[in-house]
Amino acid sequence: MKLTSLFFLLSFSAFAQFSIRHSNAIPLHGQWSFAMDTREVGATKGWYKDNYAVGGWDKVNVPHCFSVDPRYQFYTGTVWYRKSFPWQVQAGKRVILHFDAAYYATTVWLNNQKIGTHDGGYTPFRFDITDYLKSGDNVLAVSVNNDTWQTGSIPGAKDNGNANDPFPGWINYGGLVRPVYLTIEPELYLENLKIDAQPDLATGTATLRLQARVRNASATTQNPKLITSVLLGNQALKLVWKNVSPSVAAGKTGLLEAETSLKAADVKLWNIDSPQLYQLQAVVGSDTLSSSFGIRKVEVKNTQLLLNGQPIRLAGGNRVVDYPSLGSLEPDWLVEKDFRLMKEAGMEFHRLTHYTPSETFYDLADRYGMLIITEAGNWQLTPTQMDNDTIREKFKQQFREMAERDWNHPSVIAYSVGNEYLSETPSGQRWTKDMMVYGKSLDPSRLFTFASMRLNILPAKPEDEATQYCDFVSTNTYGNHAKIFDHIHALYPDKPILISEWGIRADTPTGEAGQVSHLEKVMAEIRQRPYIVGASWWSFNDYQSRHAGTNPNGYRPWGLVGPERNKRLLYHAHRREMAPLTLEKVRFQAGSQGVHQLVVRVNNRSDFPAYALKNYTLKTGEITLNIPDLAPGQSAEIMIPVRGFEQKLTLEIVKPTGYSVISETFELK
């Protein structure tokens, strides 16, 4: 895709804070005019019209979360954003307006004309605005309504008529919360790529399948030809492709397909400690679209979760998108900070949250190794809502937008179709079965689950609850752990169990020390049960909420870290408990000429977490020593030279991706 020059100024500082997946993006970041529409009169009064005066409107910087701005704090309802920009119309080009997310209900106007609407606060959407643009100044107006306190939105209010029904567990942060940008495309262009890379673990080879969605915006039928190339590092692979390239009628979208095989020498498997990425480039006519991908195999066998044929048991966490003064904004620096904190706390296998966070987190998970279950927005829908056709269609739309954004990320190993709904009811059973069928029609390459809270009431038979349809169990369990785990295993003896939520708050009578004690107690139970493959703490961070039980300061203190990511005692305990290895002193040997040796033993855990360790290093000061590859249950002794004047030595074990696993300080005597 070739960029065409624009004649308006961009706010580089705003642009630089937020990654955009499209390499040819023309961001519309920076200053916009902003107003609240408390009486819902903006549309009828023509606030979108180019002759409507906005001189009295406030000025804000987009991406923007109005809920944390002191001028609009606590407001729930419709707001308006307006921006003018110059443009030069070009023949034979299509201009696409992209929103990476806007919370929640969005309506878009351009040059006095309504472009379209979107429902949903966490998934991307776009409009072809070519026919609405004009040469000269253009006026873009967007209304956004964050009122999900009514029934009918996802997430949204329950319809029971009970107190607290309107509020999900987190704040309905409103606004243009993620990047807004343009792309310029030829009349025949690539909309999306879906890459399915499946290894043959027996032969070491792999099969690569590509589906390329092509939009023909021209006035005639086109016969597109797909040209595909793959890079491993800087090396182009020599591949032979089999293509299926149907013609695409005028104004229609077509699907081009291609398939090839990779020989064993070209296959580098992706896993959490060796996250090898490839780059695929697809060309149709004058248009090019690229995506990274990884080759890995995720499967369930009996009670095991296998990554590339090897059983894994991993810790994780639930990250709520919430930060003081930012709300639901996710600038790159915050995503990177959270990722490092989670990674170094031993969090490797996440049901991240009840909605789709910024794609930057998934990019980091791809690059540095992390497993993710990504979840669309059924948060405690009632049986009546789950049977409602409109609700079902809204969920399918959001699920599709989520899947189409994330399906090339090797870090995404599973989809969840909801959280804590009444999965033992006929409505909950139908929802689970139907939405998994729908999800697999979009992407059959992933595992499917949902987070159940109903297994805690101990159903008598497996067919009494919708987990029967899942590839693995996900249970939100907050007490009586041993009994519940054993009963779930008895119900589903051939399914691995992920504890998708567990934890205790920092404001109980036992305080932060109670969190640590709870962690240690439950971990002792988990380690005795090999069918538990993951444990994802609720939550990684404290977050604001209006839900019952929230503290007067507005926060729910479940986190390993506080609102501004200050580490609690729990963070350090979680890091210790969830490290895949332990480090112990064997002996200290005094030597001649002031040079001594400290001998330590590195033990790869055999219980939880448990996975093979390769290419780890031990560091102290300027010394870096290689640790032998260790299977679960294996150990190795490492000899470390010590200068005579040192009395203590701090050792750190580091993953091959550069993240710290554990650090210990030993007395030298």
Image (tube, rainbow, N blue to C red):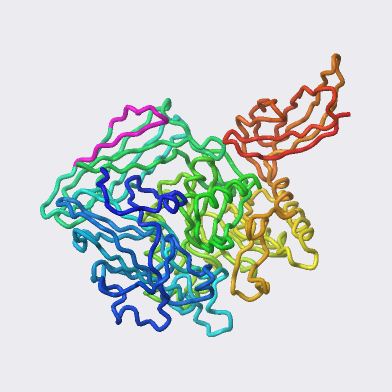
Q: x, y (%) of residue 25? A: 33, 49
Q: Is residue 446 above or below residue 605?
A: below
Q: x, y (%) of residue 81? A: 37, 68
**Can residue 467 be seen by looking at this rendering?**
no
Q: Is residue 229 magenta?
A: yes
Q: x, y (%) of residue 37? A: 40, 78
- Farthest top residue? 593
The span shown in magenta is 225-240
Splitting the image into 4 quarters, where does residue 639 fall? top right
Quadrant location, the C terminus: top right
**Depth check: 270 or 327 in front?**
327
Q: Is residue 46 magenta?
A: no
**Depth check: 610 or 141 in front?**
141
**Depth check: 310 or 331 in front?**
331
Q: Residue at x 54, y 71 (%)?
A: 70
**Can residue 562 be seen by looking at this rendering?**
yes
Q: x, y (%) of residue 563? A: 63, 60
- Farthest right residue? 669
Quadrant location, the N terminus: top left
Q: Residue at x 57, y 60 (%)?
A: 323
Q: Is residue 152 above or below residue 196?
A: below
Q: In the picture provided, is 525 more to the left or to the right than 381?
A: right
Q: In the picture provided, is 114 more to the left or to the right than 498?
A: left
Q: Is residue 555 above or below residue 194?
A: below
- Farthest left residue? 220
